[in-house]
Image (cartoon, rainbow, N blue to C red):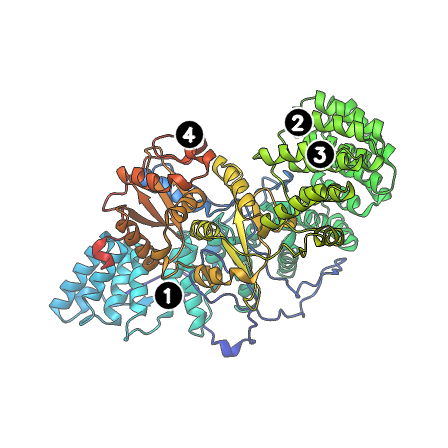
Amino acid sequence: MQLNSSPQDQTPLIYFLSSVPTPVKPYLTPMRTAISLLRSLSASFPIHHRRRLVIHRTLSLFNLIHPPVNPPRTSLFHTRSSDQSSVSHFVERLAGEDENWEFDIDNESFNFDACFGPSIDDSKNLKSAPSIDVKELDELPEQWRRSKLAWLCKELPSHKPATLVRILNAQRKWVNQEDMTYVAVHCMRIRENETGFRVYKWMMQQHWFRFDFSLATKLADLMGKERKYLKCREIFDDIINHGLIPTEYTFHILIISYLSSSNRGCLDEACAIYNRMIQLGGYSPRLSLHNSLFKAILTAPADSSKRYLNQAELIFHQMVTSGFKIHKDIYSGLIWLHSYQDKIDKESIASLRAEMQLSGIEEDKEVLVSVLRACSKEGDIEEAEKTWKKLFTSTQSVPSQAYVYKMEVYAKNGEYMKSLEVFKSIQEQSGSASTSVFHKIIEVLCKAQAAELAESVMKDFIECGKKPLMPSFIDLMNMHFTLGMHDKLECTFFQSLEKCRPNRTIYNIYLKSLLHIGNLEKAEEILRQMQNLEDVGVDSKSCNTILRGYLDGREYVKAEKMYALMNEKKFHIEPDLFENLERVLSSNEEVVKNPITLNLSKEQREALVGLLLGGVKIESDEKRKNHMLVFKFNENSGVHKVLKRCICNEYNEWLDLTSEKDDQITTISHSYFGFYADQFWQQGQPVIPKLIHRWLSPRVLAYWYMYGGYKTSSGDILLKIRGSEDGVNRIVKALEKKSLTCKVKHKGGFFWIGLLGSNSIWFWKLVDPYIVGDLKDLLKPEHLTSDLKEESQTIDFDRSDSDYSEDDAS
């Protein structure tokens, strides 16, 4: 019997790796959800392809930079079914998030034409797997073998993975390669592809296993069709490890499978497989695949997609050399990507525009706005004015960002009054400018030190009721400080407190102003306010500012106390203050020591273990000598907003303040974190330490719950963790010793430990003393808050839902 994968010619596309150029293994940042340790092989791309008419690239298409680390992106194909059980719906949805908590600050994104993309599925024309030769049951001579195989085909699809493995282990004495190939093929026939994959994985571990290219390819294709990219990738890598090259369809479906996921890192992997499809397989991707990958790149936020310029250039080059008709959005998208680069390549943009003209494609609004963006970075007034006229005549609705770019062009050339004229023109035309326009004109006027004009525009900004106001308040206060207008700075400060939430930057500017005019008493009062405000707090900058004020005012006793506080907080002291401090403290026979003697307290160590279990990432240098902690936060979660402030205060001396973002904070790179890297983050992947059962103190569990836990509407508690089943088993047993019974599910690359019913209450009593005060109402099991309503669903971890039981663990 033959299992056909395609009605077309089934000749396998098999080549030994010795027949292709020796690949160079590139550096790829490991995906947190990756299973296979073997990643992309990249060969030097041949340079013999012809270039198209006027395209002259300064960036080489062949010196391809590897895709960036874990960019946030929007799914192109991802859909979510609402007809699922409460358990699966809740866990699947949280698993699908994959802690993808990076948000785009600039809401401007590339707008694709409705007709762009694959209108026809040309993947049907690709050659798939060759036929699989397998005997039918009635062709087997032994009756007992036929009966047992029939029983396996009936039983295996109905069991959980652990039970399936136990059943197969019991058959080791009599089964062989042909028997298990039949079982796997039967599972694929009845569309139990997941069971077929598990059978294949079990076969690979047996001493009699012989690699079957046809079977592996068919399974990989089916996993890809179901968008199970991790399983498809595992078989894909296994094919390459056996010295063979996957079929063109396997490459195609694996890329599409990656693009269907919104998980962080999938776009990187899709690009890597696309490059290997061309370089290693020698295939020419279909038009639909070019378009899908290009669209995925531009759908990512601008600050991430701009890193993929080289990849987009390669896709464009492949489309040109393959003779495909280039859609106008490909040209527009490339210009859009170029306009977001830190260094603008004018020649590339000009050549793309010239080729659009030769192809009879008119420049639409998207292209013209991109050109304006590029001009604003270069300060090219002449080109900006030409582009503006064309944009103004070609569309009735000019985007607000276009006004921003035009104002920025004039500002870069010192013509701030022309920027103001642009601002007034948009007010006259539309009645009111957008928030981004207000921000830009106030920034321009403040940099030009046009105080009266800036204050007048700020007044209009406040009266129109638009938000946020804080960036403009900061610009105004910085201008007032530069001009020595300290009275107006103070008025602006109090006005900002009335209109906005307290902000540390605003307080620091006002504190610096008070000390500049010698009002030390008022400065001390402001510093105390900062300490008392949980949203603000003090940092090394504010402490250095007040310390300088004490030293300049000869308040040496207070300076000594501030030094002691900074030493306790491990704040960095500015170098120019050390000399004065040495003189002050020498009278007390004290030596000024560098306060950066970093160590973690017992409480900090326990909290860090819990945060690492909850998903904190560790990044190491090449030699694994220094390590950096990366904390990701969900900006839409009230829990994470409070927890972020707590972590900033708790680990202030360790944080790298220069890299702080709204949704992420990182520590400095330090060898002290080596122990945690060895225990929790091995070979670029999160692991569960073997001694974790000894470290699960109440404080550890509390921080794990706050950072990586969820509360359901029924009051149950879920703890999310990534790692091995053995590691999760150790955690479960450790919790049982604390009289906490829990259930476990494995979904979306995570293990979900459920504390249900009364167990959630006992868990809460255990961790309650270590939960941040402001989070107790949000996380307490008996109370459902609006902050968690969106995530909360009824959950029921019954025995059949658990991925393994006590019998499995024994």
Helix or strand or loop: what does disc 2 sit on? helix
The residue identified by callout 3 is 523
**Crowd band around label 2 with a 10 angstrom C-alpha radius: few (<14), some (14–19), many (20+):** some
Q: Which dot marks residue 216?
A: 1
Task: Name the residue type under label 4.
Answer: Thr
Nearer-N-terminus badge (4/3): 3
Q: Nearer the viewer, mark 3 or mark 1?
A: 3
**Crowd band around label 3 with a 10 angstrom C-alpha radius: few (<14), some (14–19), many (20+):** many
Q: Quadrant of residue 504?
A: top right
**Crowd band around label 4 with a 10 angstrom C-alpha radius: few (<14), some (14–19), many (20+):** some
Cα–Cα span, label 3 and label 1: 71 Å
Task: Name the residue type under label 1.
Answer: Ala
The image position of residue 26, as x and y in percent, is 57, 67
The image position of residue 404, as x and y in percent, is 75, 36
Cα–Cα span, label 4 and label 2: 28 Å
Task: Name the residue type under label 3.
Answer: Ala
Task: Name the residue type under label 2.
Answer: Leu
Query: Which of the two residues, 775 or 663, is positioned nearer the viewer here?
Result: 775
Image quadrant containing the N terminus: bottom left
